[in-house]
Each structure stands twice: as C-alpha cells, then as structure tokens.
Image (cartoon, rainbow, N blue to C red):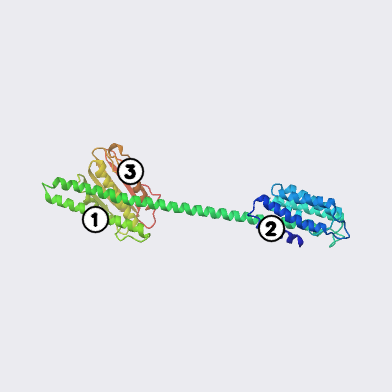
Amino acid sequence: MNGVNRVMTFEHLRARSRTLPPLTADLLVAAAVGLFTASDAAVNDPDYRQADRFTWLLLAVSVLALVVRRRRPMLVVTVTGAACAGWALYGHIGELLNLPVIVALYTVAVLGDRRRTVWTGAVAAAASGAVALRVGHDVANPQGLPVLEMVWPLVPLLLGEAVRTRRELLRVYEARAARAEEDREREAARRVHEERVRIARELHDIVAHTVTAMTVQAGVALDALDVRPEVSRRAMRQVRDSGKEAVRELRATVTVLREGDDEPTAPVPGIDRLGELIERFEGGGVELVMRREGDLDGLSPMSQLAVHRIVQEALTNVVRHSGARRAAVSVVRRDDRLTVEIANDAERGGAVGGGSGGGEGAGPGAGFGLIGMRERVAAAGGGVEYGPVPGGGFLVRAWLPAGQRPDRSQAPS
C-alpha cells in the first residue's frame, strides 16, 4: 500500500534527523513533504481540476502546519486533514496529496497515548469515508462503502503506535537496567563495608587483646625482676609468645586480604585454645577460673572463633577496665545450644564491657569490643546480652547454635 511506503520513508528521514535540533528536523521533514506533495499537485490527471491558487494555498497551509506538529499534534492533524479533504472536494486527485496528513497522524500516535490514537483513528476514518462518498471516487467498490479510503488513515496511526510502544519498552528496559546497576553497586558497597567491618573487628580483637596481655605480663616481669627472676623470665617468655601469636594472626588476616577467598595458613582460634587466653593474663592481679561442660567437639569454625573472641574481649576488658579481683569463664553445651558466660566482681564498679574509659563511665555497648562481639554472635546465628549484676560486677552472656541449623530466635534463659 502506498500509504505504508510513505510512512516508512518519513520514519527513515526522521531517524536520520534525530541528532538534529527539533526545530531543524521539523523544518527538514516539512520541506521533504512539501517537495513530494507539490510535485504531485503540479501534475494532475487531465480529467480533473488542475492546480491553481487555491491548490497552492492548501499546500502551503499543510506544509507550514507540519513545523509545529510536535507541539500541537491534534491541531496539525485537523489542518492537514481539512486541506486533504479540500483538495478532494475541489476536484484534485493525487497519490501524494495526503502525505501531510499521514505525517500528522503518525505524529499524533507516536507522541500520544493509545486512547488518543483510537479516537483519532475513528474520526479520521469516518471523515475520509465521508469525503470519499461525497466525491464518489471509490474505484474498488463504487456501489458500497469506501473501504480503502477509510483504512488508509489507520496505517500511519498503527505505525506510530508500534513505534511509541517500542520506545516505551526500551525506556522500561533502560530503567530496569539502571536499577539493576544501582542494585549491583549497592551490593558491592555493602560487601565492601562488611569486609571493612570484619577486618576492623579482627584487628581490634588481635591487637587489643595481645597488647593488654603483654602489658600484664610485662608488669609481672618488672615487679619480679629482682626478687623472683624465674617468675620474671616466665612472664617475659609469655610476652614473647603473645607477640608471636599476634604476628601469626595478623599474617593470616593479611593473607586473606591479599589472596581473596584463600584460607589463611594459621589455624583459626577455637575453644581448645581458651586455656592459652587464661595463661596470658595470669599474674595480672585477677584470679581467673574457667569451666567447660558438655561435648564441645564438632562445633563449626565460625562458632568456635566467636567463642574464642568473646572470651578474649571480655578478659581483656576485665584486666583493663574492671579492677576486678576474680573473673569466671563458663562454656556450656546443652543439646543444640552453646552458652558462653564471663562474669567478674568489679572492685571499683567497673564492667567487663567497658570501653575506653572503664569504671562508672563505661557503660554497656561502649567501645568497639562489644560492637564486634555482637556482630560475631549475630553472624554465627546467636545473640548476646551484658550488664551489671546484683551485688556488683558485670556479666556477659552469649548463646550460639551448636547444631546444624542456627536458630536466631532463641533467647537467654
């Protein structure tokens, strides 16, 4: 059908002019339409009226109207449609005289919505059929309805509707792609943040505990240097061993950072090494007692590391902040639940969970130690609570899953 070819030609011209300013593109489209329409109007069938001033006036109005087709599409359709009907009623016959209204109908569909396209198509088909009946030139069906004349206005509308729908789908796909990219960036940022927190937690647990233990043992060595040399040498050996252990753990952490998911060469501290923690603080003025109960074998590495770090952090704060004389560590497994408790009798009213200040100014949750403790327990699928106990002192209690399936809903009894 000639109407389809005309619309495809217009769409090709429009696609090539997308990089131009809108007004420049509209002027070029109007010029191209005017050129084709004028050539058809100038050479009319000898049996019909020839071009005159009225013909060129309608042409000029139609072409000029196309310049504002983006801003006033319905007005342009009305003007070009009236000009096309005027030509037919005035006695002009041509294959390209309806090109301006074809372009206008396409613009209405591509810049509008489906409802407007349907209403425009109904009115345009009815008007075209009425004009065809009035002039009586339906060659294909001279005795019936002018079917072809009623169908051709629908072609540019359908093409414009298809182009508009495709553009909308492309916009939807672009929006989805943008959202997916944003989600990926947020996920990457979240993972980076979690990794930074994990690294900070590991460094805090290693450095804070080791420095505290070394300070305690160095104090013991200094006090016993002249009176009890053997005690002093034993304390200094403990300082040396604590330093070596800290270097091993730091090397393991750096290995993870440098090699990604590769496992560190140093073993992960677990429950079996809790005795070493007690030894590091011996002689620091705090009497430490540890109790184990239940089958502590077969626990996951994450749970064992969490228990080790919880006890490590609690004992570090006992020595640094609490001023306690005694502290007790309890690790108990019953069925699928592992409970860890660290309690101290704070002589000066301090707390196991004290932050950087200790004493009364150190409340629950102060400092990075308790933050890391909560994060470790949560990652292992358990929970933690802490606070002062009646009669003085402080208690940290954590519970972890000891079975195959962590149960985050469990609460301390």
Q: Nearer the viewer, mark 2 or mark 3?
A: 2
In the shown orientation, is residue 33 left or right of residue 192? right
Sooner in the amino-acid sequence: mark 2 or mark 3: 2
Type of amino acid at the residue the image marks with label 2: Leu
In the shown orientation, is residue 87 left or right of residue 160? right
Disc 1 and disc 3 in contact, CB within 8 angstroms? no
Give the quadrant of residue 258. Answer: bottom left
Q: Position of residue 136 (x, y in %)?
A: 87, 57
**Depth check, front residue: 257 or 352:** 257
**Whole-number angstrom distance, CA of label 2 to CA of label 1:** 77 Å
Q: Position of residue 74 (x, y in %)?
A: 73, 48
Q: Which residue is mark 3?
A: 367
Q: Position of residue 220 (x, y in %)?
A: 17, 47
Q: Residues within 10 Å of mark 3 (few under 14, many from 20)?
A: some
Q: Nearer the viewer, mark 1 or mark 3?
A: 1
**Depth check, front residue: 15 or 160:** 15
Q: Position of residue 236 (x, y in %)?
A: 18, 51
Q: Which residue is mark 1?
A: 244
Sooner in the amino-acid sequence: mark 1 or mark 3: 1
Please give the name of the residue rendered at 38% of the width and 49% of the height, measured from the top-left corner.
410
Q: Which residue is mark 2?
A: 13
Please say if 261 is above or below 340.
below
